[in-house]
Every structure is written in structure tokens, then in C-alpha cells.
Amino acid sequence: MKLFVIIWFISTASFLYAQKSWIRINQLGYLCDDVKTAVFVSMDEINLLSFELVEESTNEHVWKSDRIKSFGAYGAFRNTFRLDFSDFTKEGNYYIRADQFTSPVFRISNDVYNGSADYILKYMRQQRCGYNPFLKDSCHTRDGFIVDHPARSGEHIDVKGGWHDATDYLQYLTTSANAVYQMLFAYSENPESFGDEYDENGNPGSNGIPDILDEAKWGLDWLVKMNPEYGVMFNQIADDRDHAGFRLPNKDSVNYGKGFERPVYFVTGKQQGLSKYKNRSTGVSSSAAKFASAFALGVELLKNFYPDFSAMIKAKAEEAYTYAKSDLGVNQTASYKSPYFYEEDNYVDDLELAAIQLYRTTNEEEYLYEAAEWGKVEPVTPWMGADSARHYQWYPFVNLGHYYLANDPDTNISKRFVNYMWQGLNRIYQRGKDNPFLIGIPFIWCSNNLAAAAITQAHLYQKTTGDNRFAEMEAALRDWLFGCNPWGTSMIVGFPENADHPTDPHSSLWVKEGYQTYGGLVDGPIYASIFNYLQGLTLVREDPYAEFQSLEHVYHDDYGDYSTNEPTMDGTASLSYYLSAKQKEGMEAKR
């Protein structure tokens, strides 16, 4: 009897103890030669000395290591450790065991990223406006009527198409042009990573064009409508009057005063806002240059499929860049009933990218010179290394113009821009090097977009230079998005399958009909101080991650939390490059 009591006591104590320690891993898995790490987190005092890898099917340990680094307290945890198993490269399914605690099962294989870049296109197709292939129906077919134009306000203009920005149905040039560019860039760098399972309308069926180009073309068609002629540009459709509760896009009933037509905001380059809230616009450059870069990159990639369209957007790219220089400044989005808008405060990065992309399209040296000059003005995207920033203040979050200039044959140019890329990454590294997740991004609204930007720049930096000094940070930020974070959850809805990932996103499709937003990257964790400040946040269910929340940051898989669990179109598109690059790495390693 005494023996039974002792055994019961030990088992019960072990069970209770286990509830206070977890091993976080990348649930998608690891390429064989990846930097491979896990993070052990505990609410208790614990001294971790070693860990082992266990083969899933046999439950036999196959590798043991003491490559452990202690980081002490972080967030909700009293003790944290990084476990490095990069030296283990054998393909298979494994879990980690450390001090009697085990991780979820994960895979080591060179095909773990296969199909990942195509998977996120599920969400992009679901976000289409006009004809929506997910709903097999059309929405917002009467868009729209012009506002803020000196002579044409109230006039109807056909701007159907594009993508809804997120759960709301607003449409922004700012995010849409960036999404177009990100997808085109991903294809230009890693064409072999994309398949052809859908047609140009987003319906199942091959059409001989990679699906990512179909998706980018959908966005480009809309950009053409939003820039119908030289000097006539529109920056957004609708405003935050749209925020009128959950409803399907094809049943949108918000009335802006002209039936079901929605307002289409003219790019004025001046302060805008039809009600009491005004933005801080100072010029047209940020918007016009985004048009230019997206059009210019589309020229080469689409010419074999759409030669006439390609020639047309080449001319529009050059015109848009010229117009961007005519009134230097930022053109921000506009709100109506709340103080929230995209507060973009930089534009030289947009001019740099437009100029270098036009140089690559036309081979005209003047564009190269101008790109380098614009790039010198902002060597580092200002959010990098910062503790905070306003909403979308420094956008796009990654400056891909730096990458192109870092690869220029002129060594004076390339050295300068390699250094700029290093500076940005080093600022992120220095900010995160003392925490167990090596997370150096600020936890502002849409922090996952910053993580995506950082891994993109880190990967491109190593690709350009061969310098792997940021490889562990890149891996840590990548793994953060796939579950190696305090909450142990992936940040992509439905992906990886059979993993912990968002299941209750802030989405009308989900809330009203139970349609899941597969492939969508959610906003991600934010500072508790921001969460407590934002208006209209109400958690609607018991928080499964309650014990992991902290004053440092919070994340809720709850449709009532638009600040951390809302998928966004541009954030999702921003993963295109990295996922396709990792798939390409795996494909090349298997040869």
C-alpha cells in the first residue's frame, strides 16, 4: 500500500509539473540542413542539462545533445532555453524529450515546404472582389463614385476587382500594390516552386499559367482601373463606415449615400478625410511609386502570356514614376468614423523600388542612378530595431529595392546596399538576441507582417552575400510563425494541417457561415498595452492560451480579437517569397 501511494504521488506530481513546461517547435518541420532549434519554456524553476530526439514510430531515442542555452525569464515563463539540434540531418518524424517533457511530433525532410507558397493563395482567392471564386458569386459590382476630385466628385467609375484588405471590405492601393509586387517577386526568384491548378478567375482547372501569376494579374487588372490615365490615381475604395458588423461580401448592405456604390478616393497628395478624422498626407509619391513598381515588374513576367497587357503596363509604369516625382510626399489612407488609418510616413523606399525596377525593365541608366540616390535617403526601414511604430507607419515593411541594388554589378553600389541590408538585420538581431525566441520585432499591430519582412530580408541577405551571421535569427523568426512561440501555435489558418493553428479567426466568412480562411496569415501578437487600448475588442470564448499571456505580448485565437487574429491580404502575400525560396532549397537539396 505504501508503494502504491508513493507511485501515485510521484505520478501526480509529474503530471502537475508537466502542465508548467512546454517544448515549442516549428510544426511545419525543418529542411535537413536547416538551422533547427526548439524552445523549452517553463513556469517553474528548472535546470535543463540535455535533451534528445526520439523517433516517432519506434519511440527510440536517436540523438542526444547538451547544446542548450538558458535565457531565464521571458513573458509568462520563469525559465526558458534554446535547444539546438541543427547537426541532426536525418529525414524522419521525431519529437524532442527533455527532462521528461515532450514536444509535438515534427518532420525533418527536404519536402516540408512543398506546396506552401501555393497554399497561401487559397486566402488570396477567397479575398477577391468583383467575382469571388470561393463564393461562386460576385460582390461590390457597382463600385464606385469618385470623392475628393476637384472636378469629378460624384461621378461613377468602374473599379470592380482587386482584393478585400482583410475581414473588412475596404480596398487599398497601398496594400494591394505591395501584394502584387510580393507575389511577382516571389515568382521571379523561385518560379519552380509554383503550380498551375486554377484558372485566371480563381476556379479549379489549369490554364497554362502559374497560379501566382494569375493572382498577381488579378491585382494588376485592378491597379490599371485605379490608375486610368496619367495623373489620375485612386487610393482606396470605401472607408471605415464599412465596419458595420459581420456579413458576407456578396450581401454587403452598407450604404454610403449612393445605394450600393462605394466611395473611390482620389489621390490628392493632401490631407484627406470626409468626416472629422483626417490623415496626414503630404504628396503623391508613396502611392504613385507603388503603382510604378508593380506595373514594371509585371512587364517581364507577363509578356509571354499577355503581350498587349504587358506593353500597356510598361508605359503606365514609366508614367506613374514620373508622376510620383511631381509631388514628393506620402499619400495615406483615409478614415471616416474612427481615428485608425494606415499612417505611412515614408516614400523614398517606394521611389527606390520603382526606379530600380524600371531600370531592370528598360536598362535606362538614369533609373539606376535615381534608385541609388533614393536608397541613400533611408538606409534602414525605420521600424527595424525600434520598440514601436504607428499602424503601417513604415510600409512596405521590407525594402526590396535594397536587394536589387545590393546585387548591382557596380561594386560601389552593391557594397553600400549590402551594408544597408546588414544594418537593418543587425538592429533586429540586437533587439532580440537576449530572449529565447530571438524575436527582435516590435509587437505592434500586424507584428507577423514584420516577422515576414525580416525573414525575407535575412534570406535575401544570405543569398546575396553568403554571410550566415543572421541564419539563426532568420530560423527563429520563421519558426515563430509556425509555432515556436509562447502560445505554441502556427500563425497561418489551417497550416500546417494537423497542427495547432488559428481556428477562430476574425472573419465574416467564418463567423457567419463557418467558412474557414485557409492560408491567411493572422495579424499576430501585440503588446498588452495596445490590446487594452484598442476600441471594440471583446473576447467571445474562454482563452485557450490564457496562461501564456503576459504584459510583454498577447495573442488570442478568438474572432472577437481583430488586433491579433484577423488574416490580412498583404501579410499573406508577403510570405510568398520566403515559402517559395525554402521549397526551392529543399528541391535543390534532393537533386
Image (cartoon, helix red, strand yellow):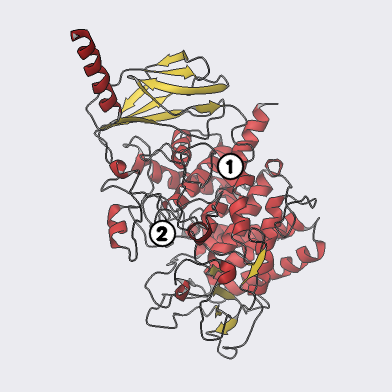
Residue 366 falls left or right of residue 382: right
Image quarter hosting the N terminus: top left
**Residue, disc 2:** 562
Report whether 394 appears left or right of 323: left
Can you tell which mark lies on residue 37?
A: none
Above-or-below relation of 246 to 519:
below
Residue drawn where x is 51% and y is 14% of the image: 58
User: Farthest residue toward the bottom?
Assistant: 151
Q: In terms of depth relative to the viewer, which is nearer, 148 or 483? A: 483
Answer left or right for 21 relative to 565: left
User: Which residue appears at 51% of the width and 63% of the height?
Assistant: 348
| Quadrant including the C terminus | top right
Which image quarter: residue 570? Answer: bottom right
| x then y, percent, for residue 230 | 66, 78
- Considering the numbered disc 2 on the image, is that residue within a helix, a strand or a loop? loop
SS category of the residue bearing label 1: helix
Q: Earlier in the sequence, mark 2 or mark 1?
A: 2
Which amino acid lies under the numbered mark 2 shown in the image of this protein?
Answer: Tyr
Tell me the residue that label 1 is attached to.
579
Query: How busy is the neighbourhood of tag 1: few (under 14 within 10 Å), some, or many (20 plus)?
Result: many
- The answer to whether residue 103 is seen in the rendering is yes
Query: Is residue 131 shown to the viewer in this render?
Result: no
Label 2, label 1: how far apart the Cα atoms are: 25 Å
Could you tell me which residue is drawn at 80 percent across and 57 percent down? 305
Quadrant in the rendering for residue 85:
top left
Kind of residue at disc 1: Leu
